Image: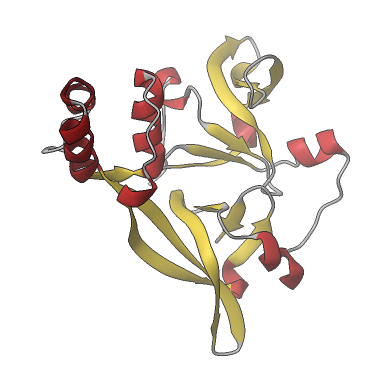
Amino acid sequence: MTRFCDEEELKGALVVDSEGLIYGRASSIVVEDDGVKLEVRSENARDRKGVIPTDEIECIAGGSEIVLVLNTRREASYRGLPSKEPMYQDLRDVKGKLVVSLSGSVLGRVLGVVVGPGEPGIRVGESVVNWIRLVRGVKRRDVKLGSRLENALDPLKSPKISREDAEAVLGELGVEEDISSYVEKGTTRDIPWSRILKIGDVVLVR
């Protein structure tokens, strides 16, 4: 099903071009005489990168975060880079990259390279944080701080959350906490090489 989002839902969403290169972050929806467009800021949010007409949006993928994939080479052109098909050597640095399916799903991040009959592939999964265990651990050390985390996100309602969400909550509260011991592997899936469309800043798959 085609996904539609309002301005609040899109604000801060990652925008990726057709080469898998990060163009920026969605900022606002602009209604102009010649159509409705999306304003995109650079990743550091200090300047306005460009305005994208809706017909350049290939898909809006949801999952651990919202990612907009464009059907144009906006960032590649901006960087002066040619179109590039995936090559096996791209797999050397693929670990940790976000994986987005053009069917409209953010699949997670690359955990590593796998092999199967006749072709290699990538294993994709999401790192989840055991939020309930983290809150309890912090509370044992600092009751006030633990209560702040508990109030920000109820661990009974959200016992496990994505690493990105955990880091966002801690960041909003200004809390510095090493969460590595609370990170667990979520569900994983293997994507064969034949389904990989682009390997850029982000991996695009069919």
Residue 98, how many percent across, how many down? Answer: 54, 50
Q: Residue at x 61, y 83 (%)?
A: 119
Rendering quarter of residue 58 = top right
Q: Residue at x 46, y 26 (%)?
A: 10
Q: Closest to the observer: 193 or 173?
A: 173
Rendering quarter of residue 91 = bottom right
Q: Is residue 156 above or below residue 99?
A: above
72 with respect to 160 (left or right)? right
124 with respect to 22 (left or right)? left
Q: Closest to the observer: 148 or 70?
A: 148
Q: Is residue 123 above or below residue 36?
A: below
Residue 130, how many percent across, how many down? Answer: 25, 47
Residue 200, how many percent across, how many down? Answer: 69, 51
Q: Residue at x 36, y 42 (%)?
A: 179
Q: How is the image coloured?
A: secondary structure
Quadrant of the drawing holding the C terminus: bottom right
Number of numbered discs: 0
Q: Residue furthest front?
A: 141
Residue 114: tell me if it is visible: yes
Q: Closest to the observer: 18 or 172?
A: 172
Residue 64: tell me if it is visible: no
Q: Residue at x 38, y 20 (%)?
A: 172
Q: Closest to the observer: 61 or 151?
A: 151
Q: Is residue 91 above or below residue 27?
A: below
Residue 195, how many percent across, how many down? Answer: 58, 68
Q: Residue furthest bottom?
A: 117
14 with respect to 147 (left or right)? right
Q: Residue furthest left?
A: 156
